[in-house]
Amino acid sequence: MDISLIKQLAVIAGEENISTNQADIDLHASDESHHPPSPAEVVVWGRSGQQIAEVLKFANAHRIPVTPWGVGTGLEGNSIPVYGGILLSLEKMTRIIEIHADDFQVTVEPGIGHKDLNAQLARYGLFFPPDPGANATIGGMLANNAAGIRTVKYGASKDNVLQMEVALADGRLIRVGSRSIKQASGYDLLHLFVGSEGTLGIITQATLKLVPVPSLMSAVVASFATVEDAVEAVVAVRGSGLDPAALEFIDAEHCRLLHEAEGVDLLPYPTLFMEFHAIHESTLTQGISMVKELCEDLGAIRIQGTTDHSERLKLWRARHHSLEILKRAMPGYKFFVMDVAVPISQYPALINYVEELRAQFNVPVTMIGHAGDGNVHVEFPYQNQAEFERALECDRLIVKRAIELGGTATGEHGVGIGKAEFMQQEHGAALDVMRAIKQTLDPNGILNPGKIFPEAIKPGT
Ligand SMILES: Cc1cc2nc3c(=O)[nH]c(=O)nc-3n(C[C@H](O)[C@H](O)[C@H](O)COP(=O)(O)OP(=O)(O)OC[C@H]3O[C@@H](n4cnc5c(N)ncnc54)[C@H](O)[C@@H]3O)c2cc1C
């Protein structure tokens, strides 16, 4: 982008909303993934739907790439501006526009963090349930269709949004969806934009579904002698009708580290963390005893249940920080985290396959997963290029197997750069339909180019 384009952009976006400072460029050149940084030429801070629409109209006329940015916690290079151009940051659009408490809904700007939103909703006794560990923005979560530990009960981001305002590549600002819970009017454009990773439009406002904060919660931790036993218990708990609000698998190594680093009372064995919500004490205690019985029958070596608030929080805090704890325990290593999901009946086959690869490749991988959704994250440590390549080979094999098992290349982190090579295998002819949609909404390929599609789509080609 030459200086005259940047000057015109400053007029459109507002002088105070753009920067070419190296520090700002560097700060927005990489996300939390292993993908290499790539700098934009200018950072623009979005301030309103209208301002963003005008920036897009200008960028489209000049074929300038625009990569949206939430807070950069993505794990697949989703928000890295691989073709330079404009990095459009939503991080300053953090307002709650309206709380519709009687409808259990809230309308927000896209840059608000989900944790910050939930902190403000607490006084209404409501919360937005999708919970990726990081304080991701609502826009970034909707764009990636993020999920998390409570998805097993409350669904992913796509299940908790009703309406959005979206700025299109040509400068139109449209509203998709409705505040009605039931919607049967026309094509479901709302869910076309959810999970599109900023390649079809920029979310400038969203109305989210909320749920009442559960009055009673319990946590159950069950350790098993083998991974097979733990994973069989996942399938059994899901099939039991117990309706867990979280059902997480943590491998033996993570349990050892959580015990040593955080003092969490865990045995170094494959373990399930479960959470249950209820409105009556008796339902909760009955649920705990049923799940204990079930895990005992499946050979659990220790089962602990608690309804104590602080113990439960300690457990989840430790679960959320497990990657950081792993990183601290292995100084000098870099990590990448992969994400696949399969139907729950195939979860044991998937986990066994990862175990086989661990032995075959002799890679010290660790696993942690939203097991209740058939979702697993495999963490690969590496110190040099050879180890990185070996990890990548392992990663590819796991993704291919997940797809063969009827699953998907990504349960929640999105495609970004890292999963683009698997899109043909997973989607076949449907990938051409995705290309046609992209061509219709963004014919010049300016929106987040280089993502989702296996061929790098350069702007203007
Ligand atoms: C420690 C850790 C744990 C994590 N755990 C989970 C987990 O449990 N579940 C999970 O799903 N993810 C998890 N993630 C990944 C990450 O938090 C999610 O992918 C999240 O959705 C990214 O949000 P963000 O605000 O950081 O967006 P970014 O990473 O900045 O952007 C993500 C994508 O959204 C696009 N985008 C951002 N804002 C908009 C917008 N307003 N309109 C259109 N496109 C936009 C970007 O271009 C990019 O394609 C984890 C990450 C870390 C670091």
Image (tube, rainbow, N blue to C red):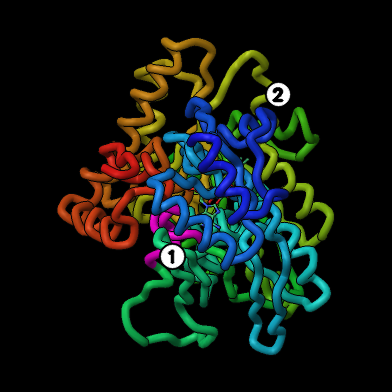
**Vertical arrangement, residue 371 with respect to residue 201, above or below:** above
Magenta: predominant secondary structure element? loop
Picture disc at residue 168: none
Question: What residue is at 61 percent from the left and 61 percent from the top?
Answer: 110
Q: Which residue is mark 1?
A: 239
Instruction: Give the residue at x 17% y 50%.
Output: 428
Let me know if residue 442 is in the magenta part: no
* The residue stretch that appears in magenta: 192-202
Q: Which x, y percent locates residue 195?
A: 43, 57
336 is higher (above) or lower (below) than 43: above
Q: Which quadrant: the C terminus?
A: top left
Coordinates of residue 410 in the picture (x, y in percent)? 40, 47
330 or 195: nearer the viewer = 195
**Compared with residue 109, is residue 392 higher up or lower down, i.e. above or below?**
above
Q: Secondary structure at mark 2?
A: helix
Reading the image, the residue beneath label 2 is: 328
Front in this rendered view, residue 52 or 384: 52
